[in-house]
Amino acid sequence: MEKLTDQEYMRYSSHLLLEGVGEQGQLALRNAKVLIVGVGGLGAPVALYLASAGIGHLYLVDDDHVELSNLQRQIIFTQQQLKQAKVSAAKASLSQLNPHIEVTAFAQRLTLESANNEMLEMFEQVDLVIDCTDNMPTRQMINKYCVMQKIPLIVGAGIRMEGQLISFNAKKSDSACYHCLYPFDDTAEANNCSTSGVLGPLVGIVGSLQALEAIKHLTGMPVSSLNRLMRFDGKTLQWQHFSVVKDPQCAVCSANV
Ligand SMILES: [Zn+2]
């Protein structure tokens, strides 16, 4: 029977004490493969928490380089890593944090055209995808592939003083998808942290919640944000939630279309 090593028993002792995790849960985390798309304000805390939690294999995709203005919120990077490819810098930080895990870095924009076999293969292998991107076309593309490959998806967003979180699970036939919630492929203007501003801890809160939901999903705990849009107002610290139901006419996830 598969067991944790002595080192792992010590490292993850706080998980092992938890009823919902225990040794079986920790083994599930060790065997898990998780794809994080976007290593920015959201992806940074997601990657740090999932690496420290002992997710066995993390895949990182991002084509950006570390810039000075990133350091205000992208807490995985340091001043010494300026100009480095984000995924390489993140991989170095994560390997220092937890040498027991494997990190695969793709320093390129996510594209899922058939020409890019490497990325398609990666999509087929992972147990969970975490969307930490900041633009609608990429979010829609990620959602489409998660529906096609039946991969659970955790989506986060943070801008100005507002955060959003929602999860979907295409393994469940009644689960909605991102396209049910936002049935359009483009936005009139590009809204992201660089153009609209954001407070660092706001994306830290949303990213931490994405990591929390990921660990819950992988260890078999109920995922509270499943088909539930959670909106956080950083000014008042108020949460609002809305149920999202599957759209029977959804162009992406409905069998009727
Ligand atoms: Zn849908």
Image (cartoon, grey):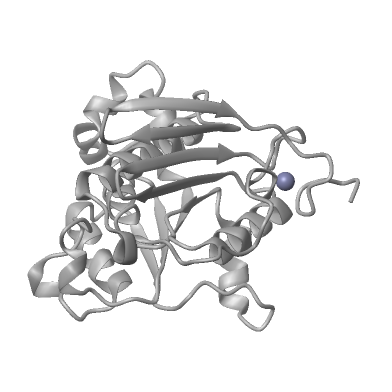
- Residue 189 at x, y = what percent? 49, 66
Give coordinates of residue 196: x percent, y percent: 32, 60
**Drawn side of residue 227 relative to residue 159, left or right:** right
Q: Residue at x 28, y 77 (%)?
A: 65
The answer to whether one can see residue 66 in this image is yes
Where is 132 relative to 66, above or below?
above
Q: Residue at x 42, y 49 (%)?
A: 157
Residue extending furthest bottom?
115
**Image quarter of residue 91:** bottom left
Q: Closer to the camera, 230 or 169?
A: 230
x 49%, y 36%: residue: 218
The residue drawn where x is 64% and y is 32% is 244
Q: Is residue 212 visible?
A: no
Which residue of the protein is positioned furthest toward the left in this rendering? 80
- Which residue occupies the extreme right position in the image? 256
Closer to us: 48 or 167: 167
How far across and how far down the image is residue 114, in percent?
69, 78
The one nearer the camera, 255 or 172, is 255
Q: Tell me if residue 87 comes above or below residue 10 in the rendering.
A: below
Q: How many marks?
A: 0
Picture coordinates of residue 56, whole percent (x, y): 39, 50
Task: Say above or below: 105 vs 8.
Answer: below
In this picture, residue 103 sits left or right of residue 111: left
- The residue at the far top in this view is 19
